[in-house]
Image: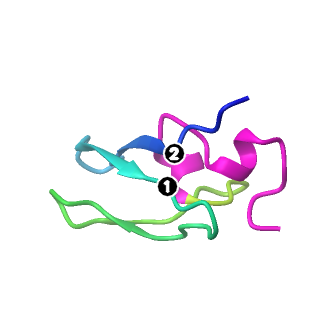
Amino acid sequence: MEVILKSTITCPQCGYKKEENMPVDACQYFYTCEQCKAVLKPKSGDCCVFCSYGNVACPPIQKGKDCCA
C-alpha cells in the first residue's frame, strides 16, 4: 500500500480548505488556518490535525500503526 503524503485540511470555523504535506516523522498537533487564523487541535480520540480535519489520515494511521508511537 502506498502512503499518501498530502491531505486537504478543512477549517471547521470558516470552511477554508488547503492542501498540506503531512510530516512522516512527527505528529502535527496544532494547525493555524490561513484564512481565519483559528488554531486547530485534534478532536478527542484523534492523534493529529490531519486525522481530525484532513481528507486523508496521517501516514502512521494509513500504515495501520499507532500514530506517533
Pointer 1 and pointer 2: residues touching (CB < 8 Å)? yes
Determine whether the residue tagged by mark 1 lies in a helix, strand or loop: loop
Dot 2 corresponds to which residue? 5
Dot 1 corresponds to which residue? 22
- Identified by mark 1, the residue type is Met
Please tell me whether residue 54 belongs to the stretch shown in magenta: yes
Spot occupied by residue 4 in the image (x, y as percentages of width and height): 56, 37
Spot occupied by residue 51 in the image (x, y as percentages of width and height): 59, 47
- Identified by mark 2, the residue type is Leu
Image quadrant where residue 18 sits: top left
Query: Badge 2 local density, few (<14 within 10 Å), some, or many (20+)?
Result: some
Residue closest to the eye, 47 or 65 = 65
Q: Residue furthest left?
A: 35
Q: Is residue 44 positioned above or below 17 on the image?
A: below
Magenta stretch bounds = 49-69
Q: Residue furthest top?
A: 1
Picture quarter with the N terminus: top right
Please tell me whether residue 29 belongs to the stretch shown in magenta: no
Circle nearer the N terminus (1, 2) = 2
Q: Is residue 55 positioned above or below 31 on the image?
A: above
Residue name at image x 46 percent, y 70 percent:
30
Figure coloring: rainbow
Please give left or right for residue 47 compared with residue 10 in the image.
Answer: right
In three-dimensional space, the C-alpha distance between marks 1 and 2, rounded to whole angstroms, equals 5 Å
Please give left or right for residue 36 compared with residue 62 in the image.
Answer: left
Q: Is residue 37 positioned above or below 17 on the image?
A: below
Residue closest to the eye, 16 or 68 = 68
Q: Is residue 4 positioned above or below 43 on the image?
A: above
Q: Residue furthest front?
A: 2
Residue name at image x 68 percent, y 54 percent:
46
